[in-house]
Structure formats: C-alpha cells, structure tokens
Amino acid sequence: MKHLISQLAHVEILTPRPNETLWYFKDLLGLEETERQGQSVYLRGWGEWFHHTLKVTEAPQAGMGHASWRAESAEALELVTRDIEALGLGKGWIEGDRGHGKAYQFTDPDGHPMEVFWEVERYQVPEHLRSHHRARPQKYVGRGAAVRRLDHLNLLASDTAPCSKFFIETLGFKYNEALAEDGTERELGSWLAVTGQMHDIAYTGDAIPGMRGRLHHVAFWQDTWDEVMRTADILRDADITIEAGPARHGISDAFFMYTYEPGGNRVELFSGGYLQHTPDWKPVIWHLSEFRYAGSWWGESLPETFFTYGTPPVEVAAPVEA
Amino acid sequence: MKHLISQLAHVEILTPRPNETLWYFKDLLGLEETERQGQSVYLRGWGEWFHHTLKVTEAPQAGMGHASWRAESAEALELVTRDIEALGLGKGWIEGDRGHGKAYQFTDPDGHPMEVFWEVERYQVPEHLRSHHRARPQKYVGRGAAVRRLDHLNLLASDTAPCSKFFIETLGFKYNEALAEDGTERELGSWLAVTGQMHDIAYTGDAIPGMRGRLHHVAFWQDTWDEVMRTADILRDADITIEAGPARHGISDAFFMYTYEPGGNRVELFSGGYLQHTPDWKPVIWHLSEFRYAGSWWGESLPETFFTYGTPPVEVAAPVEA
Amino acid sequence: MKHLISQLAHVEILTPRPNETLWYFKDLLGLEETERQGQSVYLRGWGEWFHHTLKVTEAPQAGMGHASWRAESAEALELVTRDIEALGLGKGWIEGDRGHGKAYQFTDPDGHPMEVFWEVERYQVPEHLRSHHRARPQKYVGRGAAVRRLDHLNLLASDTAPCSKFFIETLGFKYNEALAEDGTERELGSWLAVTGQMHDIAYTGDAIPGMRGRLHHVAFWQDTWDEVMRTADILRDADITIEAGPARHGISDAFFMYTYEPGGNRVELFSGGYLQHTPDWKPVIWHLSEFRYAGSWWGESLPETFFTYGTPPVEVAAPVEA
Amino acid sequence: MKHLISQLAHVEILTPRPNETLWYFKDLLGLEETERQGQSVYLRGWGEWFHHTLKVTEAPQAGMGHASWRAESAEALELVTRDIEALGLGKGWIEGDRGHGKAYQFTDPDGHPMEVFWEVERYQVPEHLRSHHRARPQKYVGRGAAVRRLDHLNLLASDTAPCSKFFIETLGFKYNEALAEDGTERELGSWLAVTGQMHDIAYTGDAIPGMRGRLHHVAFWQDTWDEVMRTADILRDADITIEAGPARHGISDAFFMYTYEPGGNRVELFSGGYLQHTPDWKPVIWHLSEFRYAGSWWGESLPETFFTYGTPPVEVAAPVEA
C-alpha cells in the first residue's frame, strides 16, 4: 500500500442561491462559519480541527467546485503530484487558498476538479466557543442538527472504473466495496478509502448519457442514528426535501438520510457503518440483483431521483414516442 | 368522561403456520411463553405483569381471534356490558380463559370479536427469571428483539365511523387523531385511547369492498428507536418481510416498523409517540391531502400493500380490461 | 378509582437569578416563552398544547412557587375542592392567572403550595412556528436541548406518608412505587400518578430535620435517551452542574439526569420508564437495602447532595463535636 | 510516518474460571465461538472477518496472555521484527496459532507479552449464519449484547513513557491523547493508534508500586450508545459487576462501560468517540487537574478501583499506621 494521501480535507460546492444554502448549512445543519472571501464562505463542523471543510461558492449552477485531499507529508505531496502529472491529469500548482498552502490541481478521469496539498491552517477557536473538552476543537452548542464533520464524497462518473483505478493505483486508496452488473461483472459503483473509514469517496455511474464530472452527494457525519433522525425532524418542517431515509444502507452498513440543500446539491447525513483496516482486503461485491439489500438494507426502495439526479442538474428531454 | 375500561389486555391472533408464528414471536421478537392449551400458546413481553398479552391459536386462516379489554373495576364491567348489550352488540358471558376470569363477549359494529373482563391472573415469575429490579416482572435477558409489551391494535373496518362512535360513546375512549377526506370530512381513520397513550386502538378503512372484521396490525412496544432498528436487522436476515419503516409516523408521532409474521398477520414494532391526558381534547384532524406528512413524517412513501392488505387475506380478482 | 385530576398542568419555580434561570430554560433546554407579566415569565416545551407549563418568578430564594393541577372536568373541580376544604388544607379561590381560569389554592400536608383549576387557555402558535405536523403544537426547531414537555415533580417532605395519603385518597392518585425502611416498612418515598405515567408526583423524605415544603426537582421529558445525553454535552460546556446521570433509575425504570438551574433549583431531564394502567396495582416496594438497584439501576452511586439538597436551600450548621 | 502495523488482531485473556468467562463472552456479550484447542477457546464478534479476535485460555490467574498485532504486509513484518529485535525486546518466532501464520513474539518495555504476524485466516461462515448482507461476515442474530468487534486494549505500566515511545517510534503509532501531571508534565497515560481510531492501545500508570505487565482492560465495540446501555441491563441482572458507566469519557470522547468478566479481567463496552487522520497531529494533553472533564465528561466520578485494579490482581497490604 502506498501512503500518499491522509484524508479528504474539504469540498467546495457551488450554489446559485448562496443565502439559502448558507441558511441550510449554518442554521439547519449547524456548521460554523470561519470566514468569507469574495463569493465564498468557509465552514466547518464543531468537531473539526482545520480551518474549514466546506467552501460554499456562489455560481450560476449547483455542483462541486472542487474536492481537496491532504497529502500524508510534504514528501508524499511531491510523489503524488509527480504521478498524477505523469498520467496527464495534472493542471498545475496554485498558491493556496484560505486555510491551506500551495496545492496541486488535477482532475480525476471523469473530469471532476480536485487538488492535493500539505500545509494546513488549524482552526483558531474564539474565546466564547472554547471548551473544557480538550479533545474537541470547540464547544458543542447543539445549534440545529449540529453535524460533527465532513465524512465523504460521492461522485457520478460516465465510467466509474477508470476513476476507481486512478484512486487505487495512483492515490493509494483501498477498494472496499463495489456494485457490479450480474454476469458481466461491470463495475457500476465503487467505494474507496484512504482512511479506516469504509469510504472517503465513492463513484457511481451517471445515468444521463454523455454527462461527466457531476456530483452525487457530499456527506456529513453525526455521532448517533438518533441525531440523524433529529435532523430529519428539523429539515422536514423547514421544507427541505428529504429524498430518502433515514434508513440503513447495505453498502457501507451505515445509517443515511439524503436531502437537497436549497442550491440543489444533494447532501447526506451519515452515521455508523464500519471501519476497515485490512490492507489485503478483497472488495465486497454486491450484484445489481441484490440491490434490495445493497441499497437500503431494511428494504425501503430508493426513489428514481436517487439514480438520476446529480449536480449540475441536467434538463432531460422527454422521451419521444414513436 | 366515562371510566369503564382500563386497558387493552390481550389479543388473540390466528395462524395457519403456528410453529413459524411462534418462532417469530419467541425467537425473533423475544416474547416469553407462559403456557399452552389445546391449539393455543399464551405469550407476554418481558415487561408485562399479566399472565399473557398475546394468544396464538392455530386456525385455517390468519386473522384476529379476539381483542380483550380489561374493565376498570368489577362495577365498571357490569356497567359496560349492560351498555353493550343494549346496543345489540353483545354475545354473552364465558367462564374465562387461561389468565382471566369471566368475560363478556361482543363485537364492534364491524364484526371484530372482542371481550371485556375484570378478574386477571398475575404473571408468576420462575426463579431463573427473577430480577433485582422490582419494577420489572422479570429479568431483561435480551433474547432477539426483546419487545417489552403489547401496545395497540389497528383494525380494518368497512366503515370506521360507527366503530369510533362505539368506542367513544359506549366504551369511553378519547378521540385523539383522525384522518379525513378533504371537503366531505368523511372519517377514513380514527386513533382512540382509554389510557394516556395516543392510541390503544385505531380503525382504518378497509380498501376491499365488502370486507368486514379484518385485522390491520397488532403492535408491540420497544423502549427506544434504536431497539426497533436493531429488530429490523434481526428480521431482515431471518427473511421476515419488512413492509415499511423503520420510520416516523405523522399520525401518533411515533416510530414504526411493519412486518408480517409467518402466519400472515401484520405486526408493528412501535416506540416513542406522545402521551395525551387532556379530557376535552379536540381530535387532531389530518386530511388525506396531507398524507405525505401524516403517513410517514420524514417522507418515505408507504407501499400499496399497507393500504390494501389485512387478515384474513383476500383474493382480489385481477382488474378486467375493457 | 376517583377521576378528579387529569394532569400536572404547570409548576412555578422561584429564582433569585431570573436572567440566568431564563437563559438555562430558553437557550439551553430550549423552552419557548409565551409571555411575561410582572416578575414572571411563562414558558412551555415545543410539544405542549397549553399556554405554559413552567412559570419562572423572581424571588429572594429558590424554591417552588406552586404546583398546579388540572381537574378532569368542571364538576370534578367542584368535587375535589370540597374534599380538600373538608381536610382543612384549602386556602380559597383565586381569579386565575395567565393561561387558566379560576383556581382553588391549597397546600399538601407538608405545606407545599398547590392549586387546581379547570378552564385552560390553549397555546396559539405564531405563524413562523406553525408545523406541517398536525399532532404537534409547533415546529420542532431543535434549539438547545429542545425538551418536549414538563413531566413530573418531586417534593421533599418532613413526612411523606400523609402527603401520599392525601394524593391517593383525596386526589385519586395511583400508588405506583415506594421506598421503604427495612423491617419497619416506614415509607421513605412514594411515586404517585394520576395519568398512565409511572409518576406525576413523587415525595421523598427531607433529610434536614424540621424542614417543610421544599422542592427536590421538577422534571422535563425528552423523547430519547440520546437526547438526554446530548443535553449533557450542552450543559457541561455551559458550566451547568450535572449532579447525577445520565443513567437509569431502578425506581421508575427511567433514564435520568439531574442538573441545577442557575437559580439553584434541581431540574431533571427524563426519558423512558414505563406506563402503568392497572387500577388495582399493588405498589412496587423497594427496600432501602436494595438502594443499589433502586437508585441507579446500572450501579452508579448517587452523590450525597442528591439526598440532602433541596430548595429553598438550607444552611446546615456544622456538626458539633463532643 | 511508518506503516508497519495494520491493526490489533486479537487479544488472549487468561482466566481461572473458564466456563464462567465463556458464559460472559458468549451468552452475555454474544461473541461467536470459532473453535477450541487445548485450554483455549477462540472467539469473534459478529462483525469480524478474521478467525478470532479473542482467545480465552484457562490459567491460574486472570490477566492478558498476549496481544497480537497484524503487520501491514509481509515486508513490514520483516522490518518491524528487525527493529524490535534491535531494541532487545524480541523473543523470537513461533510457527503460528489457530487463525494465523508465523508470529514474532516480543514484549513491550513494561513486559506485556505481544506478537506480530502477517498471514491470517479468514472466518468461514457456516451456512446457517450466512447473511444477505455482503458487507457483514455473518448474520446479526442479536444474541445477548451482540458486540460487533474487538476495539482496543488498555495496559497498566509501571512507567508509561517508554511504552509510548516504543509504540510511536518503533511500531509507528500516532500519539493522540495524553494525561499529564500538572507542572512536571510527566506522562500518566497515553492513547495511541495505528488506525484512524482514536486509540488501538492505551497505557496508564499502574498505581501498585513494583507491578509490571498488567492488564487494565480489553474493549469491545457496539454500534450505538443504546446498545451499550442495553448491555448494562443484561449484565446487571446477570450479577456481573459494572464498575463505571455507561457514560462518556473526555479522553477519547467515547461512550464507555466497564465491567468485570467472571475470571476477573476488566472488559469495556465501547462506542462512539472520534476518528483521527492527521499525520502531524499534536497530542491532546489533559492535565490531572482537569480529570473531572477527562475521566468522565458528564461528571460522574470514577470509582477508586478504576485506578488501582488490574489483572493479575494484586494483594495490597493494608497501610501500616505509624
């Protein structure tokens, strides 16, 4: 195993309705604002030690601005960027952004914008949020859903296999679970991790022909299933769409709820699941014929939108009748 | 308010597959067997103080054998049976059954068999189940889902309104919630209680024309939402059908999961909700147009079977195409 | 059984630090303010349908202002006041207060001020708090601990037995659990209910000789154990004293946490427990020698203050050595 | 960072009462037995993929037989054994044991017996335990507490600092949290991880002078806080000592309960906490003066035995008065 990346550091999401999106993340989910710059606001959960893990940027369309990975060391940053460059996926270095130092920009094989960096800025807690709890970066104040931290990312890809290969072979990720077509064994989805989490990133096939580089969802962690359900109560009466759940996935064995933030991006509230620390792990393969267990373990069927909707959203032409 | 009935004492369910039904209730749900007699087995939850709350009886078809109410006193038993008799719904006295004394048999206006009694036999705990916890009738051993107690009953009726009226006016129940047709205000469902629970019995309309006296479900209580979800895990891998949930109802505000026991009867696992102690309570009215909130508060849609299936099951003729 | 009282309607607590007490109840526990009048503020939980359940009044010392019971009907109000008057415990009628009509004031045998009334004002929800959930009086917004409702009251008494007798014989309460001295069987505590709850009021012996009429605690309900523990997190970093728990009582079988609001009154956060609907229930008796199970079922020992502290607080002279 | 070890593979505990110890682990905690050999029984949790994670061996005294670490690869095994040998802590190779291949035995600087290996045997699920859930090695049947997996180990050391140094410098662990004496900054405890867990092993100072190589506890994971509390209910009425909790630690931010298995070893039930993926993490330092937050975050005081008892147990002479 290569050890080049240490974790998913932050995600930038784009929104055409920044005020409503910030209301969702700050008032409803309970993220804390670190700072603002230009058209962007930097946020983090109460349990996070870095400057930010979510960057919300105003844009004409919803979608993912970029995903940002932290390297495992300064040396690992040099190694991994060299390998990415050699694959022709590199775009070059930037000076950095609020919260981190110089970063190397690249795309995955499906065109999702990403970056990797090493130097990071720690969160500086203001006096009124200082906790007696030394293993917490700040007080737990319980505002809204009070999500603890960013968890993972799920991207749609026109073809997931090259993306999986890139993450496994070039970035050193473990291949933990997969969804495969019966018979052909074609990969329809992959769940990949560089940490002990079951996944830091997942790829699932984009159902809209010709689409590339879209976001399925970004996920935030809550400590207990009950907190996810408490969040459902808050969101339901705030007229936020709950697309699926709260329920339990087969894939990942985790507790989930999918919602749409007002800008249109799908956001998952996530808890539970399992840790995976086996370097020679053989991926768990779910076949499509087992989806009644894989999708929602207890049996709820996932809605059609779950398989077709991503951001940026796509106008799908009505089927033409013969 | 009249105070004639103290609580739902037990329910008898009928099953064509008694061994599998008992496996479901004893091994999976964790009920305790008190005794057997003839074609019947008497069961109770670990938190129940009476001889039994569930009687499982072998029969050609699934369905409810009878529902049994305990009166509030010996005097109340006399009063209530006199009133039932006056309505023409009475069937007469029986000597009693295992666990209780003489009982008056009757039907509700839709024909569901019921009884009311006063003298009851307390559960006698065997030595190996004796608890240090004096407010518990026995040890908590955690077998299977380890449901605590019977909670309530939901019956299908060809017309719910006369049943509601009977329970409210004759038996002294509170009318806590209702489902009504928009505009006409016709009652489509009623949730009624004689205790502080939100409902001890509910009536919902039978979607199959001409059907009378059918059971929608019998519900068992678990102390926490997490226990209901733990039960889902146990049932799912035991190949028991989970029809809906775990999720949260609008009506009753409670946490639910619907399953089918192997004999075919629908069984609910239930937790949470609210208590209602207001004697001059005005029923909460949900209109059918609000069913997306009333049925499953967080938004999951309930499956078609939830609205059509009851026991005894009915062969519905396939729609004839023109 | 008499049916004279329907429920505990509200409690008035006195505080020498009203601003801090209100911060505790509104910002930390998440109660909603209905209105203010004079030195009093009227509050309720998000799940409560009456005008208020907690009245916070500025006063030189902490303690209970009064406990207020709602009668079961206008007739029951007349009956119960006549009986109280006959016992010599009555103080006479008042016009009413914000949120309810005329009330009859009295004391229990230990001198705790109480009242009973019938006419009640329903909570009028403002537009911005209106919920899609018809079985909820308002939206769940999740502020702070977001406690749902008032649950019960625990009073200290110089002698609990006459108080228990008064509640059982005059007010028609059920005697659900008791703590008794081994051998003498002297009552050291009693847990009494008029609803199906395990207790609406409890009396425990005041350890300070000569003290009468003191408050042990007032308890608020949360829907899940996890919510009580979430509350612990919020309170701990807000520098609120957590005296005991979160843990599970033997007595009541419920999940508890005891805290002190800044004015000095003990407040319990409470969830779980069991319902009791048996009119001829024999009280569960715990002996003092079983207190390792009765007090905290899982074994945590309750601190000394739990047995000695009440409000108004008492200056206890240091023991004089011989 | 070195990447030599992938995870804590299993722990062997010694017991003078093997039948009762197995009753505790199998019937109460719900572990599955894989096989027996000689005086040993091999067990695993329902969520574990290896042959076993707990080996229970009959012995005259309670204590830890050995702790076993899996290397990250065959090469890593060679590297790490060379380094251990160079430190003079090595004992040499063994052929292996049930469930794994050749292993290198060593001790930590305090004398605790350990081993490291690479080749591992996967659990072979019997037909009746095969699950529809592909990301689970077997069905969840919910027997007893149904703990999911081994979590971590806490060892007592006469001096923790050399042990911490060995794990950090030689085995490549992260130093996540520490307990330090105020002023002197002497390390009193260390929490160390090679995975993303907050700790895979902890060292705390042995309060008994002259003692070396003792076990404080071995910890098993449960998915939810509610499951830990459910376990408390099961254990309490099975007359198993619950020493502390269920409650929440400051250190690790996790939910805990400490019990004694009948052989005398302390066993923790553990859930929650946080993941730590930062390679350049600065240890969180708790000072002894903050122990009211560090030990039990919500404020429960830990009993004296928690600080003095370990296995093998020690007869402590009564203090001699001058």
Image (cartoon, coloured by chain):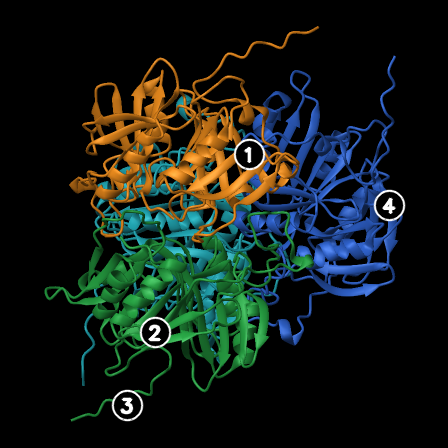
Chain colours: A blue, B orange, C green, D cyan
Q: Amino acid at mark 1?
A: Glu
Q: In the image, A80: left or right of D241?
A: right
- Mark 4, other Cα within 10 Å: few <14 / some 14–19 / many ≥20: some
Return the residue at label 1: B187
Marks 1/2: CA–CA distance:
44 Å
- Mark 2, other Cα within 10 Å: few <14 / some 14–19 / many ≥20: many
Q: Quadrant of residue B108?
A: top left
Of label 2 and label 3, which has the lower sequence position? 2
User: At which x and y percent is residue A19?
Assistant: 80, 57
Return the residue at label 4: A61
Circle nearer the viewer, 2 or 3: 2
Marks 1/4: CA–CA distance:
46 Å
Q: Secondary structure at mark 4?
A: loop
Q: Are marks 2 and 3 in contact (CB under 8 Å)?
A: no
Between B4 and B100, the one lying in front of the other is B4
Circle nearer the viewer, 4 or 3: 3
User: In the image, which disc is placed on residue C106?
Assistant: 2
Q: Are marks 4 and 2 in contact (CB under 8 Å)?
A: no
Q: Are marks 1 and 2 in contact (CB under 8 Å)?
A: no
Marks 4/2: CA–CA distance:
67 Å
